[in-house]
Each structure stands twice: as structure tokens, then as C-alpha cells.
Amino acid sequence: MDIREMNLKLVMILQEWDPFNIGEEGYDGEIEDVIQSVHDLHHPSDLAKKIQAIYEESFDQWIPLQECTKVSYKLLAVKMDATSQT
């Protein structure tokens, strides 16, 4: 899997997540920031905190860290799968 394919899978996971129930298309900027964070971070709790901060900054709403952690594990699993195939 190349980086483009990996990024598309990450986008799909984040669109399906829809933490504020505003629809898949309502998070384009946040998704872009989270994907960059997936490339930069390697630990689920670090990524979860970053996800929480990104969404809170944009929407002025707080997401429980546990919810962000669940998503971070899914995202990092895609990253690990992509890097193990190269």
C-alpha cells in the first residue's frame, strides 16, 4: 500500500467517525490535520490527544479522550499495515 492509498483509508475512517454528527463532509480541515499527525506520531495516546485538540480547536467542543483513543488505534493500524508492506 502506498502513501496515497493509506491516506484514503485514513480519510474514510475519520469520515465515518463523525464525532459531532454533522456529516462526513464537515471535517475536511480536521481530517487533513489528523492525517498529518498520523504520519508524525506513533503512540496511540499521543495521537488521541492530538486528535482531541484538533477537533476541540475547530468546533469548540470537547470529545472524550477514550473516543479519540479508539480512533487513534484504527488510524495507527492502517499506518502499520502500510509500512509493513513496504
Image (cartoon, rainbow, N blue to C red):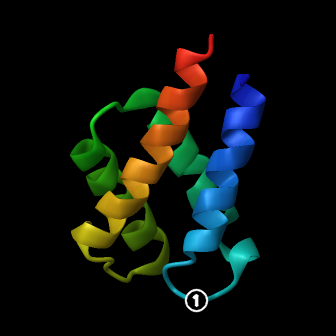
Above or below, comparing residue 81 to residue 59 in the picture: above
Residue 46 or residue 72, whichever sits in front: 72
Quadrant (top left, top right, bottom left, bottom right) of the N terminus: top right
Q: Position of residue 48 (x, y in %)?
A: 31, 54
| Relative to 24, 66 lies left or right | left
Type of the residue with mark 1: Asn
Q: Position of residue 70 (x, y in %)?
A: 35, 62
Q: Secondary structure at mark 1?
A: loop
Quadrant (top left, top right, bottom left, bottom right) of the C terminus: top right
Above or below, comparing residue 59 to residue 22 in the picture: above
| Relative to 80, 11 lies left or right | right
Write the residue at 67% across / 53% down. Answer: 11
Residue 86 or residue 62, whichever sits in front: 86
| Relative to 40, 24 lies left or right | right
Write the residue at 65% across / 67% down. Answer: 15
Q: Position of residue 13 (x, y in %)?
A: 60, 59
For this orientation, the residue located farthest to the top is 86
The residue that disc 1 covers is 21
Q: Position of residue 19 (x, y in %)?
A: 49, 79
